[in-house]
């Protein structure tokens, strides 16, 4: 029987190398013919025999199909098994090869671990801070709202928080927000436990947690309307405080603890996963607002948070806010001055929290990617070098029948293995690195609690390892594998054409990594210079020898302004009597720690360009000794004294910026100011008695702001004593900080044993914290460029050492023929220097071109700073010189006779 | 003379393995061997042999090689592997165990 082979089968056979269908046909054919033969012997005719044979066989087609199916499956399984087998063999070979070259393996694994580990750590940070959603329900519906204050003279706008009327009006009028909550943060004294604690706290509107999308895990939330005046004082604790202060006891709910001296009932406890969106408040109180009788329009103290309606977008909300502002401005045209309707501005909550650091993190990510690239270049170079040494082995393998694909596959397996081991070590490094980053980051980075090494990060590390393995493995594998044995043995060596090609590639790689390294160095240089500049900024006061501490005097124990004044007067008197004290005083807001409490002021009798006679200033309440304690120079008039008592004539001191802003051509002394700027204002008018120098209130890179200082005893009369309870006490002394702190603590404990102190630290520490941001970035960049420098040096050294080793004979010959050592040395070094210069030029050109990227991070430093652009390459040249010199020296030390005989 | 019996798949495997115990055979040879040994009492649909052979081949119990038959024709010879021998032993044991149990039931007296 003839079987017509069909085309499909032919093709399949060609592809598979096995003709399953054909074989089955042949097998069945054989059977039928054999059976027919037997039947013929038994006496049948040919036709009969064939027919009977067929009959006995059964359904030929079905059998054929079944056997084909089974056959295909068999071939498939065998193929897979052989592939796995091949992989296993390659892995074993790779492992053995690495074991035989432990130094190589160690260097490569370490290099990769550094690169992959650093990148994984940074990814964990970026993922936690920028990618992870905030821990609230539907957090992308949340927005932060604030007001923009635009000065009448058209100067730059400023962010301010809202006043009670503004908050209530917005809440009532909005259609795009499902709810708007208000809060302000501060610290409170919590008592009733082993020792009084001073903890960060927030006073919130009753709907705060509901708007945010969080709820207590024990007890209940605040009820609507519970924040009206006259209701019982209730609080919700954070998990940390609950455990610390109350031992995590479930009986805590319903119990009462004193907060700022007054009993408050605990109605709920928040889960451990809860994080306050603005700072780290551990206790939530209610901010009492009377909707029928809100506080003044010019008292701005409420931060606002909003949750969008399910079908509203951010754009719609923004549009609505603009409309509302315009409408209010039109409805109340007689309201003028800075206390009219400020435009309300908003942005998504997460953006508000992390927006500032986004650019920083992107730059750091870019830099660390460069480090990985350099690491890959180094490893590629090392592998290329190794390929040369293995050309004989490869030749033998090729002779034994390994095709080019096989050889490449085997070498890629080796690269992959090395990369995975490096990746594993990198993950370990990354875990440590993440811990390190969290450690140095707390003030610099928001949302650090969301940073951790999780499944996604590990997956990334794995993918990165494989990708780097591919990257640095492909080049050497392609350049190393050859399937003609003789060619492999001959050309694989350094003198063949492939060897020469390899050499060029290696040189280019080294030049490339030098270029990348210099880019990182320039970046680090710019940031470090920024950091140094920042540290040199004159903050307007002296901080050596100054210690500070915060406390707040509760209205329970110090109900009247006189009580407060008495405490502070006595405190000042006792502290100044201590040995070595040069100055002591309290202030509402310490410089460099922010500028809370902007108030509008009315400048009665002022001769300012602003006809409305109003302005704003940051409101500071100080004790007489404050300016002395921080050595803030007095520019005109006098400081506050003990005579500026509660019942004496109201006085004020302004700073330079305020004087220049509102009395540009006149002497402000003896002019009068009044807190608040609206008709019917009952705050007493104060006389300006002094002008002090500016201090940097918001931070070292901030601007000077207008500040108004008021003596503490008199401040009780303004705004019901706003800013008189909380104080940061600054003490300058000649003795060491520890004993100063101890002595002052003793005085305070004597005056009031239940008063807890917070943030006890030296002023230097305060300054350091304000530098934390820049320090973080510049520290990371410095680490990265140091690693890049080391890797670059290793790369250059490796290449030079290799070149020297290859040319030992030639060098020996040269020296035997009379060339002097110095010449030989110079020859090698020069080669290395040429490469370095090539790389430097390319890298510097690139850095010059893309320098704008870091413009946002540098402070008072141009992105093309000549010092940095000169210094970075010089440093690299010096290192490269050393890296090239060492092998050169070895070259020159070669004994010519030995060298000539060497292989 | 028993009727043409339906032979269970597992039993067929066992028979094939047994057939190959002594020397490699092609599919037709196995068929003839079964005929001869059972004195033609066991008649299997001859086609059914081949899927069974291929399945055993896939499982690695027998291996296959193309060779030349006694009449100088190309034929596919099958041979037992070590795994195949092991399998056969176990199957025989299992069969004997099962059949002795059945015997016991059939010979049981009314208790």
Image (cartoon, coloured by chain):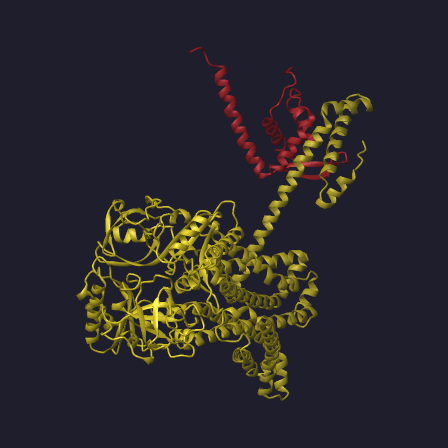
Number of labels in the image equals: 0
In the orientation shown, which residue stands out farthest toward the top?
B110
Which chain shows up in yellow?
Answer: A
In the orientation shown, which residue stands out farthest toward the left?
A750
The quadrant the N terminus of chain A occupies is top right
Q: Nearer the viewer, residue B96 or A889?
A: A889
As displayed, is residue A263 above or below residue A721? above
Q: Nearer the viewer, residue A809 or A107?
A: A107
> Position of A646 compared to A522: left or right?
left
Quadrant of res A304: bottom left
As displayed, is residue B37 above or below residue A412? above
Q: Position of residue A605 (x, y in %)?
A: 37, 72
The residue shown at (20%, 66%) is A567
Quadrant of res A900: bottom right
As displayed, is residue A54 above or below residue A479? above
> Position of A310 compared to A168: left or right?
right
The answer to whether residue B37 is visible is yes
Q: Position of residue A750 (x, y in %)?
A: 17, 66
> Position of A47 compared to A563: left or right?
right
Q: Colour of chain B?
A: red
Q: Where is residue A322 in the image (x, y as percent from the top left)?
A: 51, 55
> Position of B18 compared to A256: left or right?
right
Q: Where is residue B59 in the image (x, y as percent from the top left)?
A: 60, 37
């Amino acid at each position: 029987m003839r079987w017509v082979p069909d085309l499909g089968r032919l093709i399949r056979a060609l592809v598979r190398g096995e003709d399953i269908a054909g074989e089955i046909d042949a097998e069945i054919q054989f059977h039928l013919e054999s059976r027919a033969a037997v039947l013929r012997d038994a006496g049948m005719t040919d036709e009969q025999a064939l027919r009977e044979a067929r009959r006995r066989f059964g359904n030929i087609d079905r059998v054929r199909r079944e056997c084909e199916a089974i056959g295909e499956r068999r071939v498939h399984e065998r193929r897979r098994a052989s592939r796995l087998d091949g992989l296993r063999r390659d892995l074993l070979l790779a492992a053995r090869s690495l074991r035989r070259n432990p130094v190589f393996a160690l260097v490569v694994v370490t290099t990769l671990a550094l690169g992959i580990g650093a990148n994984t750590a940074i990814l964990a940070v970026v993922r936690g801070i920028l990618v992870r959603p905030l821990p609230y329900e539907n957090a992308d519906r949340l927005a932060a709202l604030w007001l923009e204050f635009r000065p009448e003279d058209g100067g730059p706008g400023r962010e301010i928080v809202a006043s009670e009327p503004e908050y209530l009006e917005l809440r009532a009028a909005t259609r795009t927000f499902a709810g708007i909550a208000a809060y302000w943060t501060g610290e409170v004294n919590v008592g009733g436990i082993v020792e009084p604690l001073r903890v960060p706290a927030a006073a919130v509107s009753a709907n705060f947690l509901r708007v945010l999308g969080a709820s207590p895990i024990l007890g209940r939330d605040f009820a609507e309307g519970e924040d009206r005046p006259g209701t019982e004082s209730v609080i919700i604790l954070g998990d940390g405080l609950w455990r610390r202060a109350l031992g995590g006891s479930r009986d805590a709910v319903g119990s009462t603890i004193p907060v700022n001296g007054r009993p408050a009932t605990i109605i709920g406890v928040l889960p451990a996963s809860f994080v306050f969106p603005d700072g780290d408040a551990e206790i939530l109180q209610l901010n009492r607002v009377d909707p029928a009788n809100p506080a003044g329009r010019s008292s701005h103290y409420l931060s606002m948070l909003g949750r969008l309606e399910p079908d509203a977008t951010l754009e719609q909300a923004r549009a609505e806010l603009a409309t509302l502002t315009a409408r209010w401005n039109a409805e109340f045209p007689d309201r003028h001055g800075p206390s009219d309707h400020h435009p309300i501005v908003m942005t998504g909550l997460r953006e508000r929290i992390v927006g500032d650091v986004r650019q920083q993190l992107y730059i750091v990510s870019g830099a660390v990617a460069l480090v990985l690239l350099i690491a890959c270049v180094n490893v590629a170079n090392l592998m290329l070098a190794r390929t040369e040494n293995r050309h004989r082995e490869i030749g033998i393998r090729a002779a034994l029948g390994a095709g080019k694909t096989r050889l490449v596959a085997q070498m890629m397996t080796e690269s992959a293995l090395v990369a995975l081991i490096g990746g594993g070590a990198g993950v370990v490094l990354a875990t440590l690195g993440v811990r390190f980053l969290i450690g140095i980051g707390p003030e610099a980075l928001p949302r650090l609690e969301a940073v951790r090494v999780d499944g996604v990060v590990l997956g990334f590390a794995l993918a990165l390892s494989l990708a780097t393995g591919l990257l640095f493995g492909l080049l050497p594998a392609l350049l190393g594998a050859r399937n003609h044995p003789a060619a492999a043995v001959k050309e694989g060596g350094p003198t063949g054409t492939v060897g020469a090609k390899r050499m060029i590639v290696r040189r280019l790689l080294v030049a490339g990594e030098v270029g990348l390294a210099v880019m990182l160095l320039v970046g680090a240089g710019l940031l470090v210079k920024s950091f140094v500049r920042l540290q040199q900024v004159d903050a307007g006061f002296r901080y050596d020898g100054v210690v500070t501490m915060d406390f707040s005097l509760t209205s329970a124990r110090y109900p009247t302004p006189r009580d407060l004044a008495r405490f502070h007067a006595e405190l000042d008197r006792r502290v100044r009597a201590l040995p070595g004290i040069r100055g002591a005083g309290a202030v509402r807001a310490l410089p460099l720690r922010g500028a809370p409490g902007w108030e509008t002021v009315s400048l009665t009798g002022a001769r300012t360009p602003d006809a409305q006679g109003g302005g704003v200033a940051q409101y500071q309440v100080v004790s007489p000794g404050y300016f002395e304690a921080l050595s803030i120079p007095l520019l005109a008039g006098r400081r506050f004294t003990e005579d500026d008592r509660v019942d004496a004539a109201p006085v004020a001191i302004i700073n330079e910026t305020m004087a220049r802003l509102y009395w540009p051509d006149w002497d402000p002394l003896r002019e009068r100011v009044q807190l608040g700027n609206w008709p019917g204002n009952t705050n007493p008018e104060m006389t300006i008695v002094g002008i002090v120098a500016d201090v940097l209130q918001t931070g070292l890179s901030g601007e000077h702001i207008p500040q108004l200082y008021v003596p503490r005893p008199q401040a009780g009369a303004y705004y019901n004593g706003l800013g008189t309870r909380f104080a940061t006490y600054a003490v300058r002394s000649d003795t060491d900080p520890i004993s100063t702190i101890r002595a002052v603590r003793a005085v305070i404990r004597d005056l009031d044993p239940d008063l807890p102190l917070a943030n006890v630290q030296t002023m230097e520490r305060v300054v350091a914290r304000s530098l934390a941001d820049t320090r973080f970035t510049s520290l990371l960049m410095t680490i990265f460029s140091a690693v890049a420098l080391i890797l670059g040096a290793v790369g250059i050294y490796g290449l030079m050492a290799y070149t020297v080793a290859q040319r030992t004979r030639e060098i020996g010959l040269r020296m035997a023929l009379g060339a002097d050592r110095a010449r030989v040395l110079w020859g090698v070094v020069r080669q290395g220097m040429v490469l370095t210069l090539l790389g430097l030029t390319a890298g510097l050109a690139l850095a010059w071109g893309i320098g704008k990227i870091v413009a946002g991070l540098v402070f008072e430093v141009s992105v093309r700073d000549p010092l940095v652009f000169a210094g970075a390459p010089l440093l690299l040249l010096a290192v490269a010189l050393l890296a090239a010199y060492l092998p050169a020296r070895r070259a020159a030390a070669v004994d010519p006779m030995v060298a000539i005989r060497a292989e | 003379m028993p009727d043409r019996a339906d032979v269970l798949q597992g039993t067929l495997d066992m028979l094939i393995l047994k057939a190959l115990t002594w020397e490699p055979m092609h599919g037709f040879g196995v068929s003839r061997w079964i005929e001869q040994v059972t004195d033609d009492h066991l008649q299997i649909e001859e086609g059914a042999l081949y899927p069974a052979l291929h399945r055993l081949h896939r499982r690695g119990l027998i291996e296959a090689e193309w060779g030349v038959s006694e009449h100088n024709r190309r034929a596919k010879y099958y041979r037992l592997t070590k795994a195949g021998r092991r399998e056969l032993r176990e199957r025989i044991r299992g069969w004997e165990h099962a059949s002795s149990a059945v015997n016991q039931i059939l010979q049981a007296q009314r208790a």
